[in-house]
Image (cartoon, coloured by chain):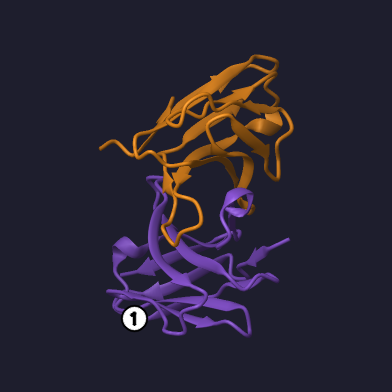
């Protein structure tokens, strides 16, 4: 049971480049989300999905796209990377409406130069 | 909208001593859950303890316990017999109990705990 798998673990991009952060879970969780973590700001929600085919914006969605074609996968796309997107990104999944905590991936450290 | 506030950016404790991390939250909902997550230098997010709002009894997990004051909207974490491995960033988080689009996990800004030998 792998839990939540995030790839890559580290990435350096040049300004203007695009890329996709991959996230997959094998727990059949209905709810998946992407967070970014910046010093002094905690984790802020970028986008989330309550099920396959359903996505919505979180607190800081600008510059990011998501899709959810299957229950297992929830990729995050950076359309045109900017230095302000330098951050650590976490994917997380859970069952909805329960006391169960989220299961987090191991994170991706992204640097945009 | 719900908010979570951690007013202590950094804390320090001596090994084997007890430390309490503070967290307050704001919500108009009656059904919700509260969590404490630990993030060690490895970056992994680890669930430490959880509390259901409708339960009056404070949650306990080994050396970790919470003081849940619903009326005051306070949810502090007490770590007893602190160990070197407890050194980490600790995040308080809120989650609505109503599911669907309200299922988001809302985090505080974190408290960095140092454990002195």
Badge 1 is on which residue? B17
The one of A31 and B114 positioned closer to us in this rendering? A31
The one of A5 and A69 positioned closer to us in this rendering? A69
* Residue for point 64% across, 52% down: A41
Query: Quick one: SS at disc 1?
Result: loop
- The chain letter for the residue carrying disc 1 is B
Q: How many marks?
A: 1
Badge 1, how many Cα within 10 Å: few under 14, some, many 20+?
few
Image coordinates for residue A60, horizontal then vertical, percent: 71, 41
Q: Quadrant of the C terminus of chain A?
A: top right
Image coordinates for residue B87, horizontal then vertical, percent: 38, 62
| Chain the render paints purple | B
Q: Colour of chain A?
A: orange
* Residue for point 63% across, 34% down: A55
* Residue for point 47% across, 41% down: A30
Image coordinates for residue B35, horizontal then vertical, percent: 48, 64
């Amino acid at each position: 049971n792998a839990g939540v798998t995030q790839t890559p673990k580290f990435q350096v991009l040049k300004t203007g480049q695009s890329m996709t952060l991959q996230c997959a879970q094998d727990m059949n969780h209905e709810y998946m989300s992407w967070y970014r973590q910046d010093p002094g700001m905690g984790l802020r929600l970028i986008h989330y999905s309550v099920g396959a085919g359903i996505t919505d914006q979180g607190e800081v969605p600008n510059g990011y796209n998501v899709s959810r074609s299957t229950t297992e996968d929830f990729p995050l796309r950076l359309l045109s990377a900017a230095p302000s997107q330098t951050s650590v990104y976490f994917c997380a999944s859970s069952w909805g409406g329960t006391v169960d905590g989220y299961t987090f991936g191991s994170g991706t450290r992204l640097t945009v130069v | 909208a719900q908010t979570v506030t951690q007013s202590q950016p950094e804390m320090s404790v001596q090994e084997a001593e007890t430390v309490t991390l503070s967290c307050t939250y704001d919500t108009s909902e009656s059904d919700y859950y509260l969590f404490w997550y630990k993030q060690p230098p490895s970056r992994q997010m680890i669930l430490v303890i959880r509390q259901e709002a409708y339960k009056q009894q404070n949650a306990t997990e080994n050396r970790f316990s919470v003081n849940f004051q619903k009326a005051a909207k306070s949810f502090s974490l007490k770590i007893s017999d602190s160990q070197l491995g407890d050194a980490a960033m600790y995040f308080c988080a809120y989650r609505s109990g109503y599911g669907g689009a309200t299922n988001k996990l809302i985090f505080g800004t974190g408290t960095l705990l140092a454990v002195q030998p």
